[in-house]
Amino acid sequence: MQCPICTKYHMCSFNVILICISLDWDKDGDILAVIAEKSSSIYLWDANVNKISQLDSGMRDQMSFLLWSKTGPLLAVGTSKGNLLIYNQQTSRKIPPLGKHTKRITCGCWSSQNLLALGSEDRSITISNHEGDTIRQTSVRADPADVQFSVMKTDERSSPGESTVSGALGKKTLFLFNLNDPDNPIELAFQQRYGNIISYHWYGDGYIMIGFSHGYFVVISTHIREIGQELFQAHNHKDSLTSIAISQSLNKAATAYVVYVQLIRSKMPLQGDAEETNC
């Protein structure tokens, strides 16, 4: 595993003779955390001093997931058997491994309030606090992927904080789980001709843009009066779509297909003129 870090002024690198599984920067962009195959260590590279250190995870099963908090010095590490470790970089405190899931942890996300949502191959999603305590758990019908926190519009006033966890289930449906209404999750299905869900992004006032494998992308709203309705749909790529991205500051979205990127410029929700560029 070689991980070069390049800047305008210098180039640094470190080498570990292992296969990298996952890596992530802390919120300040100072510490790069890395997990690798056949290793129980978490590698921490300090970009300021170009120094790498090893943190013993204490876990015997293979690590499969790694993610820093967006707001604090907390690092979450999940394993192939569903265990979870939370490490505080500032205090060097490790919360001992917890049996969070029964199978591999595959995805997750921190909220701005330091809640941690995890998706697993056991077809469940858990939400934990920064101490690792489970505060919500829900079963789903297929393997979850791309778990995200955001705000779902339930009435004229939005819920305080990022109170909704979303995820793509089996690449076919979009799952919305409101922490304030855990008994009424929402699962949205889409037209079969769209193909599989490739990527999705929350933006604006509770909108979600979703890209599909057959070249379609759609915009939906999480406003309760509009839930399940497609506010916009386009088929800009005839054969397939590989990725989407949104810039809220520029009010643009980009959809990609192989060597083409198409930019969509408009008011929210995103719809309107498109421009295409070669990559």
Image (cartoon, rainbow, N blue to C red):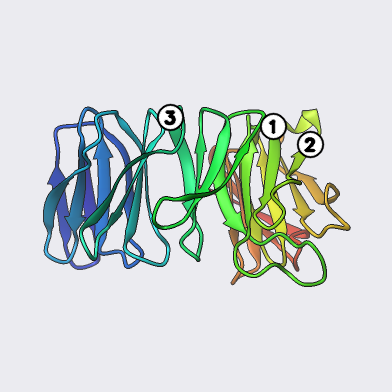
Question: What crowding class fits label 2: few (fewer than 14 Cα within 10 Å), some (14-19), or many (20 or more)?
Answer: some
Q: In this rendering, would 33 be left or right of 261?
A: left
Q: Earlier in the sequence, mark 1 or mark 3?
A: 3
Tag shown at residue 104: 3
Q: CA distance from mark 1 to mark 2?
A: 7 Å
> For residue 270, which quarter of the picture?
bottom right
Q: In this rendering, would 196 be left or right of 118?
A: right
Does the image show residue 215?
no
The spot of residue 129 in percent (x, y) is 46, 56
Q: In this rendering, would 229 be left or right of 147?
A: right
Tags 1 and 2 touching, CB below 8 Å: yes
Which residue is tagged 2? Answer: 190
Between residue 80 and residue 222, name the one nearer to us.
80
Secondary structure under badge 2? Answer: loop
Secondary structure under badge 3? Answer: loop
Which residue is tagged 1? Answer: 172
- Residue that appears at 61% across and 54% down: 254
The spot of residue 72 in percent (x, y) is 36, 66
- Residue that appears at 15% across and 56% down: 12
Q: In this rendering, would 107 be left or right of 193?
A: left
- Residue that appears at 41% across and 50% down: 132
Q: CA distance from mark 1 to mark 3?
A: 20 Å
Vertically, is 111 above or below 141?
below
Tag shown at residue 24: none
Q: Earlier in the sequence, mark 1 or mark 2?
A: 1
> For residue 164, which quarter of the picture?
bottom right
Vertically, is 242 above or below 155?
above
Between residue 71 and residue 264, name the one nearer to us.
71
Q: Earlier in the sequence, mark 2 or mark 3?
A: 3
Amino acid of disc 2: Phe
